[in-house]
Amino acid sequence: MNLQGKTILITGASAGIGRACALQLAQQGAHIIALGRRQDALDALAASLPKGQVRTLAGDLNDEAFVQKIDALAPELDAFVNNAGVLRYAPILDLTPEDNAWMFQTNVLAALRVTQGIARGMVHNKRGHIVFMSSIAAREVYRLASVYCATKHALSALARSFRLELQGHGIKVTEVAPGMVDTDIRAGSTHPDVLASVATRKFKALTAQEVAQAVVYALSAEPNCCPDLIELRPQGSA
């Protein structure tokens, strides 16, 4: 579709892939509703684009009151980029119950709750496009990323479920699954085994901008074309 004038909501838009998606979709003429936890970062995003093209809403997707505010936006949305996620790299025996709950709560349960609310509005409008930002980890399992991989497996299953159940309502669902991306999501991973693994990496990670290009492609596809799954890998990482 022509993205000019379309309203697109993006979670995790204060940094990384979400911010890159907001910038590139805005360049296509879309109106962006940018969600994130840091108002200062959202303000910086808004300041980098023409006045009025970006609305911001700061909050935590695990906060039900905040999610209800998102639900209220559903009727005006043309597309939703379900991007927010968290990561803790560590050997599986060193992950704490708090680490595990944090990743599942944000990456799976909060993503599901937000998508349900937005999808109900799209069903009412009989149109819309939902993009799930999963990962290559949704189909593979890596050392030091066990629970993160499990959350992305679950998110991929949800993406396919929404696609099956919403396609009859005129709604597209796309899963974008990048490999390693050069963002701050790994900044909190300080385990020595993780740092040693990153130091010996023999390929260059994807950029957030490269992943955002895939999102623009998916949302710009012709009406009869639904890109179900787009996998992105850094060259040399297979």
Image (cartoon, rainbow, N blue to C red):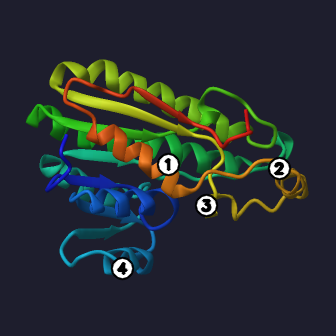
**Spatial distance from mark 2 to mark 1, Cα to Cα?**
20 Å
Q: Is residue 68 depicted above or below 145 in this figure? A: below
Compare marks 1 and 4 and give the one earlier in the sequence: 4
**Which residue is labeled 3 in the image?**
183
Left or right: residue 101 compared with residue 2 = right
- Measured as percent of width and height from the top left, residue 156 is found at 50, 29
**Which residue is labeled 4 in the image?**
43
**Spatial distance from mark 4 to mark 3, Cα to Cα?**
19 Å
* The quadrant where residue 183 appears: bottom right
- Which residue is pictured at 35% across the width and 55% down the height? 10
**Spatial distance from mark 2 to mark 4, Cα to Cα?**
35 Å
Asked if labels 3 and 4 touch by Cβ distance under 8 angstroms, the answer is no
The 10 Å Cα crowd at callout 1, few under 14, some 14 to 19, many 20 or more, is many
**Which residue is labeled 2 in the image?**
201
Circle 4: residue type: Asp
**Spatial distance from mark 1 to mark 3, Cα to Cα?**
11 Å
Is residue 48 at least partly visible in the picture?
yes
